[in-house]
Amino acid sequence: MKIECTIDGKALSLSVNSNKPLSLILMEDVGNRTITSHCKGNACGNCIVLLNDEAALSCVIPAFRLRDANIKTFESYQKTRQYRDIERAYQATGNTPCPNCYASKTLIIESILQELTSSTRLKTLGNNLPMKDTQETEDTLDKKAIIQELSLNTCQCMDMSEMLQIVEIALTYRRRKRVRRN
């Protein structure tokens, strides 16, 4: 099967089996060195990529779902300005994921930050809730969604409260950048 997609900013045309998992495509066909897939499809979370800007387990995504997709691996993500927000948050808290899950947890946090800074999502939440309860409910919904998203990686090197703190601090950095640009 021929698949057209963008991986790390490069438009590619790949000839692969339609059921071949993205993790193997990245390792074998693209030569990516940062993807690790120790679990062989059991969803440990160490093979996270950004698929159309959302965190996704690359070991369970078949090739046929990649048509016209934009895939970003940690290898290219760490060269972006957005990466610096998360790096600074790790430094500010004094907590950093272990080397086994560092890349995937960082990409999960980026996915969360993109969702939280998206004005579309905030407007949708606000329009569906009573006016006086909007802020309180948004925080609760966000926290639950953040915990669920962070659970994509099963490594126990950090507890959830540490991860939430990192997300909050990185979000503060990200929002400051957006205010300066406007």
Image (spheres, rainbow, N blue to C red):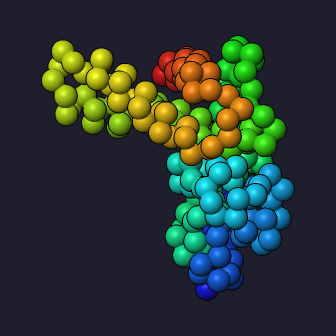
Q: Is residue 11 left or right of residue 140?
A: right
The answer to whether any part of residue 77 appears in the image is no
* Residue under the point 80% across and 71% down: 28
Q: Residue furthest bottom?
A: 1
* Residue under the point 25% across and 28% down: 126
Q: Is residue 30 left or right of residue 128?
A: right
Location of residue 14 with respect to 101 vertically, above or below: below
Q: Quadrant of the N terminus?
A: bottom right
Location of residue 170 with respect to 42 vertically, above or below: above
* Residue under the point 78% across and 72% down: 29
Q: How many numbered marks are there? A: 0
Q: Is residue 149 left or right of residue 76?
A: left
Q: Residue furthest left?
A: 130
Residue 162 at x, y percent in the picture: 62, 21
Location of residue 182 with respect to 52 vertically, above or below: above
Residue 151 at x, y percent in the picture: 55, 40
Residue 30 at x, y percent in the picture: 78, 67
Residue 125 at x, y percent in the picture: 28, 32
Which quadrant of the structure image shows residue 41? bottom right
Q: Nearer the viewer, residue 34 or 38?
A: 38
Q: Nearer the viewer, residue 20 or 12?
A: 20
Which quadrant of the structure image shows residue 144? top left
Which quadrant of the structure image shows residue 79? top right
The answer to whether any part of residue 22 appears in the image is yes
* Residue under the point 73% across and 46% down: 74
Q: Nearer the viewer, residue 178 or 169?
A: 169
